[in-house]
Image: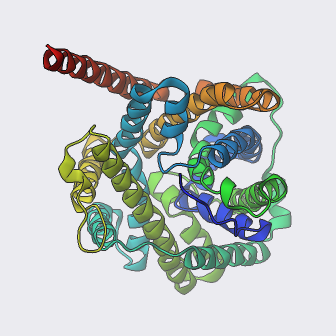
Amino acid sequence: MTQYQKTLGPLQGMAMTVTTFIGTGLMILPAMSVAQAGSFAFYAWLITAAMIIPIAFIFALLGAKYPSAGGASHYIGRAFGGGIEKAVGWLFLSILLVGPAVAIKVAAAYLSIIFNVTENWILTFSLITLVGMMVFAMAGIQTSARFQSGVVIAMIATINLLCLLGDIQSSTQVITSPSNLADWQTTLYATGVIFWCFLGIEVMAHMGAEFKNPTRDFPIALLGGIAIVILAYLSLVLLIAWHQTYGDEVTNSQSLALLVSKLLGDTGSRIFALGAYVIAFANVAIYILGFSRMVQSMAQQGALPSRFNQLNAQGAPAQAVLLVCAITLVSILFSELSGWKMAWFIEMTNGSFLLIYTLTCIAAIKLLNKQLKLLALLALCSCVFMAFFIGENMLFAAIMFCIALSYEWIRSIKNSSKCVNLNV
């Protein structure tokens, strides 16, 4: 078992929490939520935050008790067996079909601002960005926590500046409380899109065992970090609604740059766009490397050909990186040619992660002690609540998981038959 170095304090943990949750979502979700929920967006964010906190705690508890590179699939496997564990691994990889394309297109939208070109260039910039991420992953380069924290601190400082220049106090006038059933429906359905910004809770699972005093420090780090993230998002929701830098997909994907341009001028907008692109590139590139590591892990388990387990001279799983980037390329091209809305890809990604979170909460009810089962049940209720408002976009996750279960069941039957023949 991996021996963790207990070196984290509450402030370091808080910085890591912020780094985990502030990524490409910051560039697009505030505008998307305002476009969808209007003046009710503020409440939609508060509701989503309330739903996500118990789920985050469950991952933290399981991560401290069962530290493993397998993350959620490992916890689920401990509760329900190896076949389910591999099926969850397949489900996680299926996110490649819908998730990275959105994040890369968001990054490309900011690249188009830097070069001051039309939206027709977004596909070209998306492909260039993907190639850059492939080189990044092949080289085995991993952005240090200190660098990512520095970028996030710079982003938070920028948000504070925008709040000052954008008159955040006056922008609170856009907040409207839902007052009837239709208003609440509009508010609650927006939580399905907002959920995207909280993808990455599974990363937090690996932090619990690294705190000097997990019982005391981890709740401070988690709640403090999430509070900073929520304040950052809520501030941008108010500013974007007040200054009306939202609208269609392209406008939403460039909403922060448009806000900066309105408050600081074109030069400030381009500087901000460059910073936004760096954040998006680093964030998605790390996730692509993470997907590649998952492919490598599944190759080690025998679920994929052994060639995906091979490392290059830099220690990166080169074949796995190529596979992940090839699938991402297909996803980018499909999203461009199909004309599907970006929100659909986001919600299908949300559905896949939410199914993984739901299965993890069910596993937690079995794995955690009696006192913590109530928290696991509360987290499960949060997952069911979110699933209802993601709605039909949960079908993608359900279909992928059923296919994965069927595949693993057929493989287990074949393996059993081989064992019987060998014994004979």
Q: Is residue 389 visible?
A: no
Q: Position of residue 87 (x, y in %)?
A: 39, 30
Where residue 20 appears, as percent x and y from the top left, is 60, 60
Q: Hey, which quadrant is residue 369 in on the image?
A: top right
For the residue pair 391 and 284, the one nearer the viewer reads as 284
Left or right, 43 with reference to 275: right
Tell me: 163 left or right of 336.
Answer: right
> Compared with residue 63, is residue 266 higher up or lower down, i.e. above or below?
below
Please provide percent x and percent y for residue 74: 50, 39
Q: Report the quarter where the C terminus lies.
A: top left
Q: Residue at x 38, y 71 (%)?
A: 112
- When the figure is inspected, residue 264 is found, relative to residue 337, above or below; the finding is below
Instruction: Give the image quarter of residue 124.
Output: bottom left
Q: For residue 226, which quarter of the picture?
A: bottom right
The residue nearer to you, when weighing 327 against 67, is 67
In the rendered picture of this protein, how many numbered marks are placed on residues?
Answer: 0
Look at 52% across and 83% down and name the residue there. Answer: 271
Q: In the depicted view, which residue is nearer to us: 131 or 422?
A: 422
Say whether residue 122 is left or right of residue 208.
Answer: left
Q: Residue at x 71, y 65 (%)?
A: 13
> Is residue 208 shown to the viewer in this render?
yes
Residue 282: horizontal and vertical position, in percent?
Answer: 45, 69
